[in-house]
Amino acid sequence: LTYPGHASIITGEWPAKHAIYANSIFDPGKGEDRGFWYASDIQSKTIWDAAHEAGRIVSSISWPVSAGADSIDWNIPELWNSQYNDEPAWIKQYCKPELSDMLEADGCAIGNSFLAKSESHDEFVASAAESIIKNKHPDLLLVHFLAADIEMHRNGRSSEKLRGIMSRIDGYVEQIMNATKDAGSYDDTTFMVVGDHGFADIKWALRPNVLLAQEGLLTITNDKIADWKAVAQNTGGSAAVYLADPHDGALIKQVKTLLEKHAKDE
């Protein structure tokens, strides 16, 4: 998943240490969809912390788990629509007014940063990066393009649209590289183009919460969790099963037996 991967990229640690184990926190029954948005969620030292301590100027554009990071001078964090706020207004709360005004003046409206509109989002990220390089001269700049990720999540690695999307992202990388040339920093800049996680085409899906509900360990009312003794949180290619009472030996045995029984059930 994206958020654990990005946290590992900027800490050099596994999720077990940096503590970002999914895109969203575990909150059964609340329905808050509270993502791991905040830099304070990371329990390991980040590259932006190290750069800041060294007196460097740091900027980040749509990088996961970055909202509220004191070590990032010019930050446009990644957030999504939720009960807390709509996306652009949400982002502006964590973006310095000076930066927001500068981007608007350069034609980079934060209103174009919706994650669900990945093509316009990526165009915004590239243009914002160009503006920040030109005006703020960061020593460390982190950017997150997501159209390829979204397309593969929806339609797999074999998507007919993927080649065109990757070509477009290549163009955005070139745009950023050209911005450093215009700013006179190209010869002193190292570019790192990395992926956050891999993909595999899937033919079927497992839904362990159906089994847990049938076993009476999970109660759903109006499509929401009303009560639970055991529940699985989907994290993409895997899932974690949580127990309301992790010290209940009988419950542990019941859940383990249930899952093992259906492990090879077509």
Image (cartoon, grey):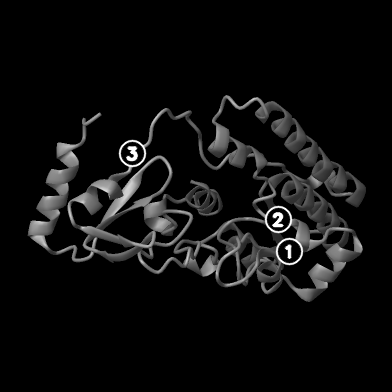
* Foreground tag (3 vs 1): 3
Tag shown at residue 57 = 1
- Amino acid beneath label 3: Leu
Kind of residue at badge 2: Leu
From this view, report whether residue 187 is shown above or below residue 28: above
Answer left or right for 104 relative to 211: right
Name the residue carrying label 2: 140
Sequence-earlier tag: 3 or 2: 2
Residue at 56% x, 53% y is 10
Q: Nearer the N terminus, badge 3 or badge 1?
A: 1
Q: Which mark is residue 206?
A: 3
Q: What crowding class fits label 2: few (fewer than 14 Cα within 10 Å), some (14-19), or many (20 or more)?
A: some
Residue at 16 percent across and 50 percent down: it is 255
Residue at 12% over, 63% down:
248
* Residue 44: percent from left, percent from top: 46, 61
The quarter holding residue 155 reads: top right
Between residues 58 and 119, which one lies in front from this camera angle?
119
Regarding mark 3 in the picture, which secondary structure is present there?
Answer: loop
Disc 2 is placed on an element classified as strand
Q: Which mark is residue 261?
A: none
Q: Give 8 or 227, whichever is nearer the viewer.
A: 227
- The mark nearer the N terminus, 1 or 2, is 1
Residue 40 visible = yes
Q: Are marks 3 and 2 in contact (CB under 8 Å)?
A: no
**Mark 1 element type:** loop
